[in-house]
Amino acid sequence: MQISEELVNQVVADVLSTLSRQGQVTQTAGSGMTQVRNSSSVILSEKVITADLLAEKAKGQTVIGVTAGAILTPSAKDYLREHKVEIQRATAAASSKAKQGGTWRAIVLSRAGVVEQALTNIEQQTGASWSQELAGSLDEAVQGAVSSLCRADAAGVVLFVSAAEKAACLANRNQKICAAAIQDVNHLRTVVSQMSPNLVCINPEQKSFIELRNLMKAFVSAGTPHPEV
């Protein structure tokens, strides 16, 4: 009996999700987290960083370390700005980042569990460095994606929103953005070949872990976008 790689990935993701809910899984970030420990007195291993968590565990700190996949909520970002706190993320090795064209960014409006699983899995599979952020509204999500690309601090951005078409339309108002709403992997490959978007908008609703993982994998595999904008 042959077991496909996709089936194995799905089983592993389901098991990890169950263990995580039971508090039995502790994520580590290898050498990247070691580097963060060297410069941060407080290390947060939680997947979602909130203002309440920061107030409880990082009060009085100026530098805080978090895992590579940690999601900052809007309230957490407000806390960081207000208290002038710097966040340091554990990242993939520099050689892996160079190979994949730098850091990739995911902005999640509706924090579906399947999205989080796919993001974690794609980092492990490709070695690409992903930063994750939880947005509070469609406008905030789009503005975050646009700002990141205009600052050139991300090779490409994936926006997970239910209103994917509207998000792409709003983002394309900026001359430096080439955004597209994507349906599936084949659609993504066609769009990449025609316009090399630096922002793809995906509706995660009714999409499986495998579908989302393959979409992000295809986006990264295409290399750093060079849109004609």
Image (cartoon, helix red, strand yellow):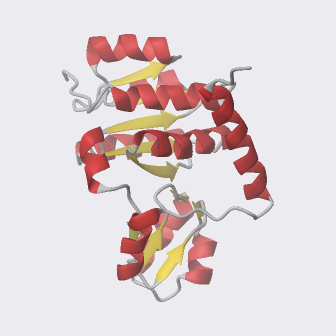
Q: Position of residue 59 (x, y in %)?
A: 53, 86
68 left or right of 223 in image? right
Vertical comparison of 92 with 34: above or below: above
Residue 156, image quadrant: top left
Vertical comparison of 19 with 77: above or below: above
For the point 57% across and 39% down, which residue is it? 118
**Observer-nearest residue: 144 or 156?**
156
Vertical comparison of 54 with 164: above or below: below
Residue 116 in sight in this render: yes
- Total marks shown come to 0
For the point 75% across and 46% down, which residue is it? 15
Q: Position of residue 224 (x, y in %)?
A: 26, 33
2 left or right of 123 in image? right
**Observer-nearest residue: 201 or 130?**
130
For the point 31% across and 30% down, which residue is it? 198
Residue 108 in sight in this render: no
Q: Position of residue 81 (x, y in %)?
A: 41, 71
Q: Position of residue 73 (x, y in %)?
A: 55, 58
Residue 87, image quadrant: bottom left
171 left or right of 1 in image? left
Q: Quadrant of the image for the C terminus?
A: top left
Q: Quadrant of the image for the N terminus?
A: top right
Outermost residue on the front side: it is 1
For the point 37% across and 10% down, which residue is it? 190
